[in-house]
Image: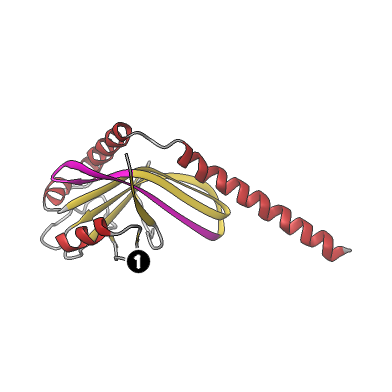
Amino acid sequence: MQDIKSWIMKAFVLVVCITVTLGFVLTGISLAKTAGEIDASVDASLERFRKEVKGAEEFLKSAKGVLVLPGVIKGGLIIGGEYGEGALRIDGKTVDYYSTASASYGFQLGGQKKDIILVFMQEEALNKFRESSGWKAGVDGSVALVKIGAAVSLDTTKMKEPIVGFVFDQKGLMYNLTLEGSKFTKLKK
């Protein structure tokens, strides 16, 4: 009898966790943005990036392409999920729209909102990304996440990675993050 009660309690907790996680993820999906809304959010995110990171303007000018995913929502209670939409820009113009999604499990509780910026420094990496039907970080390509302190600036001559990533939350550039397992999929807008 005790085993059955224990099993029912565990099943109940699991169902609650899945429901809460899906609520976070589906809220982001159900509120899919229009192309104009995405472009406005991308502009604001890039402006913030330029203000907060010394040397960002020159760094972005040297890029072959820039994928900006503003307001990516992440939430979890044991099981977690993440979703956001953004735009790929080449020479400052939007060429495609993308979504990012990932799932995780383990000890986690809460939610957060963040901006992700992927800077393609090599034409080959950009082309591989654009030609894929569902590009996965860490599988289809490696992203070097930059961790910059307030006194440090970007130096384009020292950036040798094909794809460089930045993650911001409301407080600024975030540390100790990974994009491993994040899937990026082209949207029809």
Judge whether residue 122 can be spotted in this image.
Answer: no
Q: How many marks?
A: 1
Q: Nearer the viewer, residue 150 or 36?
A: 36
Q: Position of residue 153 (x, y in %)?
A: 18, 53
Q: Is residue 14 left or right of residue 127?
A: right
Magenta stretch: residue 102 in it? yes
| Quadrant placement of the N terminus | bottom right
Task: Indicate the amino acid at tag 1.
Answer: Gly
Q: Is residue 124 left or right of residue 141?
A: left
The residue that label 1 is drawn on is: 138
Q: Residue furthest bottom?
A: 139
Q: Residue at x 60, y 46 (%)?
A: 20
Picture quarter containing residue 146?
bottom left
Judge whether residue 107 can be spotted in this image.
Answer: yes
Magenta stretch: residue 124 in it? no
* Magenta-drawn stretch, dominant element (helix, strand or loop): strand
Q: Position of residue 170 (x, y in %)?
A: 38, 41
Q: Is residue 146 above or below residue 24?
A: below
Q: Disc 1 on helix, strand or loop?
A: loop
Q: Residue furthest right?
A: 1
Q: Nearer the viewer, residue 8 or 78?
A: 8
Q: Position of residue 116 (x, y in %)?
A: 32, 49
Q: Is residue 157 above or below residue 42?
A: below
Q: Residue at x 20, y 63 (%)?
A: 162
**Crowding at mark 1 (Cα within 10 Å: few <14, some 14-19, many 20+):** some
What are the residue bounds of the magenta stretch?
86-105
Q: Nearer the viewer, residue 100 or 171?
A: 100
Q: Residue at x 56, y 47 (%)?
A: 22
